[in-house]
């Protein structure tokens, strides 16, 4: 099999992992090899599914000894298998990088022989790139859950980012769909990365020349919509992961059907909007001061597909509004629908010198229509409190009408 | 009103602006014209060219303003010089002006600045280098000739000649002198490789963009050509050299890696999530001409839908024997229904289906993998060489074969034809899964106390795809289908043993596990 055929198989197998960002790492050119990162990720192309191509995202191999039902590479899947040699990956990365096709490498792998063996193979590639070729571009390595601490240490020396995938929102989901994977094992790997990174950061504060460890931190991803886990459960898991392991990002991938999938999985893709609403909620939690528990309720554990989560919250909390653009503190401004994080910063800076009229907000491209009922400016006060009855509680498409992923029953 | 034509150069504006402030020109009395845009010269003289404002001998400016102005200055908007002067003038009396983004002038400055920043970002992203090799290299696809340019004599690395409708277009590349003391490294095998890109930015951003490429590709010899200007980087002297602009034809037309890159591009997207609007908003059509992968787009988009529906159909049509298994699970009924099974493709090749055989109420069921050559011809399980081993074990343990039930996980023979030989092939997981309903129906009919799986395929049928035989053989395990299931090696493993010693060892495994299964089955519940 030639490199091109392998590339086709092993890129195809990697396309279900959403993470592609290359932001967060700073690496200046070293003068000995190609590559630098300026902290801001660059998308070098976009694919017809609208996703950014910033890294060479491939698997080292799609052979896998595990049988995770949601995964196209599971052992029982009748797909074509291939395996790159580490040298092939190194060459591809450098050749593509030199032509400015990519920012770096995102290398993952099916689990072969053992977690440690697999991790060693991934490290081998990163090590060759960094030490033999002095490659200064971005490297994201998959941390294989259950790999030994020593290997995690090594991986972090060469990689800008490490990620251990949580795979599914809850432990029950894993029991059903990924029998070999356990939340405890995955989280202990996350914990190793977090602890090691803390140590390395502290060492570098004392001695700036101390080795760096995964400067762009760690991330994870979960597949949503393959199991009946609710948005509320997903956001609770997210809060736990962000808090416990200082993750940079969580990627939510809506389940989409793939060739030779197990019959226990839904046939319909998860609505793309559900993914979008989860990302919006994730942003609200990380940058806007919202709690996971505020965004959904026990009675209504799903996010609305027709309305953004900030508007939903605003409708349910009339007592909080209206907010005076010219006087309210940052925390309150951040809760007004239609005003983004950056515009809150701009409002705070401008209003010292200039009092806001509605027109000024338009100039900042605030989404006036959404914001109007919730704010006060010099020339505007909402006529009445927004009513809660307007809030539309829409339900999500029923993905499990004919097949239950939990029990496998039809 | 005083008109001053200005070259597209930030420093020229600074000079002009400084002088105008000294003289006391108010913004409305001055017109800083973009000299690259031909203007109809207004010949009627204005009433006055003389400034009426107060002279400002020591103008105030801030770092923030200069930074923003440097970006706005490369914008192609013809009014940018006047805008910058107006803001500079207003800054003299209002030091906080820049912070008020809602002011029309500041909003305009921010608009220009952000458009230039976006243009820069897109240039960093969408420049595509193409490699040119040394002169005389037989594989160098761009036509490379080594000749002196008549009007520019002197040292040059190579001259790139690209055919255009108007004849050959010649581009000289700077001289490359490989350092004899430096041995080529794997990352830099040929220090005279030259990478060339052609790009057309919206604004005159090349000088702002070049440092990014100089840092990122500092060990490479590269040139970026744009219609306004071009820039080359020398990795030895670490120097950027700017030169006049060049047309697209001056750059190589392709690179040997582009097919590989296109393969990657076609494989990395998910057709089930097609979203071309999103793609176009991030990568507007005007950038497409630089990107080799775009030639694939129409085809990828058109085929996405059919790929997804094919995928779903295939998932719905995963092979399964379920529709062929009768509701009545008694052994004669199953036996009668079996020959009609088309649950997977194996029926097309085998001579006949091979049902299980043995006692209808056996306490022990043996499950093999699938029929072999002999079994396929005779229609009985375990009658070939592996069956002989099984008989020997049972004789040794005093087990009467008629008291147990023997069957296979897969009921049809799978093989490849080699001349006259029919070579056994392991069934795939999908075939094992497809046939499982038959096995479960047999188990349901017989209700054995113990199931003994012979070999990995049989074990995988009942324990799932990841069952590890050598780890867990000889243990009494529980499955959803029976309370006591034991796995052991397949009798044919004994036949395939590489030497006599390991053959004996395997035989002993088989005998011990069989003994355990038999005795467990005899025990009263």
Image: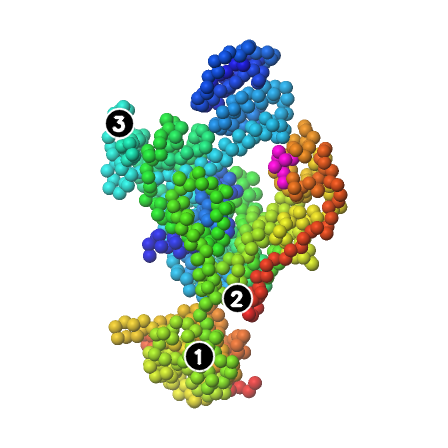
Real-space Cα separation, disc 3 to disc 2, in angstroms? 70 Å
Q: Is residue A246 left or right of residue B461?
A: right
Please state which of residues B458 and A351 is positioned toward the viewer in this rendering: A351
Horizontal and vertical percent position of residue B492 = 36, 77
Q: Residue at x 62, y 28 (%)?
A: B103
Magenta span has A314? no
Please state which of residues B179 and B272 is positioned toward the viewer in this rendering: B272
Both labels 1 and 2 in a single chain: no
Q: Which mark is residue B149?
A: 3
Horizontal and vertical percent position of residue B396 = 40, 87
Query: What chain is tagged by disc 2?
Result: A
Q: How many marks?
A: 3
Query: What chain is tagged by disc 1?
Result: B
Q: Residue at x 49, y 80 (%)?
A: B326
Q: Is residue A1 left or right of residue A109?
A: left
Real-space Cα separation, disc 1 to disc 2, in angstroms? 26 Å
Q: Residues within 10 Å of mark 2 (few under 14, many from 20)?
A: many
Give yes or no for contact between labels 3 and 2 (Cβ–Cβ under 8 Å): no
Q: Which mark is residue B440?
A: none
The residue under label 2 is A264
Quarter of the figure with the N terminus of chain A: bottom left
The magenta-colored residue range is A361-367
Q: Which mark is residue B367?
A: 1
């Amino acid at each position: 099999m030639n490199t091109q055929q392998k590339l086709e198989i092993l890129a195809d197998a990697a396309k279900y992992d959403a993470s592609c960002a290359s932001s967060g790492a700073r690496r200046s050119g070293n003068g000995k090899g190609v590559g630098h990162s300026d902290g801001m990720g660059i998308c070098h192309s976009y694919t017809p599914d609208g996703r950014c191509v910033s890294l060479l995202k491939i698997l080292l191999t799609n052979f896998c000894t595990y049988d995770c039902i949601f995964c196209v590479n599971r052992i029982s899947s009748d797909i074509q298998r291939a395996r790159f040699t580490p040298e092939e990956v190194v060459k591809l990365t450098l050749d593509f990088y030199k032509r400015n096709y990519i920012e770096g490498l995102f290398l993952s792998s099916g689990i072969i022989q053992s977690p440690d063996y697999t991790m060693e193979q991934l490290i081998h590639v990163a090590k060759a790139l960094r030490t033999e070729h002095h490659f200064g571009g971005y490297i994201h390595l998959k941390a294989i859950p259950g790999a030994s601490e020593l290997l995690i240490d090594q991986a972090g020396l060469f990689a800008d980012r490490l990620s251990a995938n949580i795979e599914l929102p809850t432990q029950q989901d894993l029991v059903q769909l990924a029998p070999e994977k356990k939340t405890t094992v995955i989280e202990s790997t996350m914990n190793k990365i977090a602890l090691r990174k803390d140590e390395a950061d502290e060492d570098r504060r004392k001695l700036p020349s101390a080795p760096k460890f995964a400067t762009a931190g760690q991330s994870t991803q979960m597949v949503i919509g393959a199991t009946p886990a609710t948005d509320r459960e997903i956001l609770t898991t997210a809060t736990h992961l962000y808090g416990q392991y200082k993750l940079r990002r969580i990627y939510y991938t809506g389940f989409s059907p793939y060739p030779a999938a197990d019959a226990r999985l839904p046939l319909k893709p998860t609505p793309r909007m559900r993914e979008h609403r989860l990302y919006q909620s994730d942003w609200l939690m990380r940058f806007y001061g919202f709690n996971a528990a505020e965004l959904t309720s026990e009675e209504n554990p799903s996010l609305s597909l027709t309305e953004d989560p900030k508007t939903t919250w605003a409708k349910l909390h009339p007592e909080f509004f209206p907010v005076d653009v010219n006087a309210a503190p940052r925390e309150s401004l951040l809760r007004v629908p239609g005003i983004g994080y950056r515009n809150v910063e701009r409002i705070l800076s401008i209003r010292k010198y200039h009092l806001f009229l509605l027109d000024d907000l338009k100039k900042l491209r605030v989404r006036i229509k959404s914001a109007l009922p919730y704010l006060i400016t010099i020339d505007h006060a909402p006529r009445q409190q927004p009513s809660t009855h307007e809030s539309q509680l829409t339900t999500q498409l029923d993905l499990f009408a004919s097949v239950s992923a939990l029990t496998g029953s039809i | 009103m005083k008109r001053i034509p200005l070259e597209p150069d930030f420093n020229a504006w600074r000079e002009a602006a400084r002088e105008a402030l000294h003289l006391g020109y108010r913004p409305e009395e001055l017109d800083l014209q973009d000299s690259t845009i031909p203007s109809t010269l207004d010949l009627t003289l204005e009433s006055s060219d003389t400034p009426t404002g107060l002279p400002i001998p020591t103008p105030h400016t801030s770092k923030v303003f200069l930074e923003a102005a440097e970006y706005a200055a490369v914008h192609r908007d013809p009014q940018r010089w006047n805008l910058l002067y107006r803001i500079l003038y207003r800054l003299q009396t209002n030091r906080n002006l820049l912070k008020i983004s809602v002011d029309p002038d500041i909003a305009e400055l921010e608009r220009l600045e952000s458009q230039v920043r976006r243009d820069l970002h897109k240039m960093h992203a969408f420049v595509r280098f193409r490699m040119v090799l040394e002169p005389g290299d037989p594989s160098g696809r761009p036509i490379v000739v080594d000749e002196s340019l008549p009007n520019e004599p002197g040292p040059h690395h190579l001259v790139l000649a690209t055919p255009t409708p108007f004849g050959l277009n010649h581009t000289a590349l700077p001289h490359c002198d490989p350092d004899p003391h430096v041995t080529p490294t794997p990352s830099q095998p040929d220090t005279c490789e030259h990478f060339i890109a052609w790009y057309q930015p919206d604004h005159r951003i090349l000088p702002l963009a070049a440092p990014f490429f100089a840092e990122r590709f500092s060990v490479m010899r590269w040139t970026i050509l744009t219609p306004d200007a071009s820039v080359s980087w020398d990795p030895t002297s670490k120097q950027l050299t700017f030169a006049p602009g060049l047309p697209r034809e001056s750059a190589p037309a392709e690179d040997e890696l582009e097919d590989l890159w296109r393969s990657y591009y076609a494989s990395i997207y998910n057709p089930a999530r097609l979203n071309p609007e999103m793609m176009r908003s991030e990568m507007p059509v005007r950038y497409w001409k630089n990107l080799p992968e775009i030639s694939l787009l129409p085809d990828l988009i058109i085929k996405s839908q059919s790929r997804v529906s094919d995928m779903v159909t295939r998932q719905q049509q995963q092979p399964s024997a379920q529709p062929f298994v009768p509701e009545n699970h008694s052994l004669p009924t199953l036996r009668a229904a079996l020959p009609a099974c088309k649950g997977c493709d194996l029926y097309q090749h085998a001579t006949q289906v091979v049902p299980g055989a043995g006692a209808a109420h056996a306490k022990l069921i043996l499950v093999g993998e699938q029929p072999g050559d002999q079994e396929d011809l005779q229609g009985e399980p375990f009658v070939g060489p592996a069956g002989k081993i099984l008989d020997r074990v049972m004789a040794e343990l005093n087990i009467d074969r008629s008291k147990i039930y023997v069957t296979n996980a897969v009921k049809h023979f799978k093989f490849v034809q080699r001349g006259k030989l029919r070579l056994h092939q392991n069934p795939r997981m999908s075939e094992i899964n497809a046939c499982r309903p038959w096995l479960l129906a047999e188990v349901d009919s017989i209700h054995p106390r113990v199931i003994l799986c012979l070999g990995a395929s049989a074990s995988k049928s009942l324990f799932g795809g990841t069952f590890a035989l050598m780890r867990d053989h000889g243990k009494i395990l529980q499955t959803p289908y029976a309370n006591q299931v034991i796995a052991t090696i397949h009798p044919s493993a004994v036949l395939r043993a590489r030497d006599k010693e390991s053959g004996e060892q395997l035989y002993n495994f088989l005998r011990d596990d069989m003994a355990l299964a038999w005795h467990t089955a005899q025990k009263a519940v």
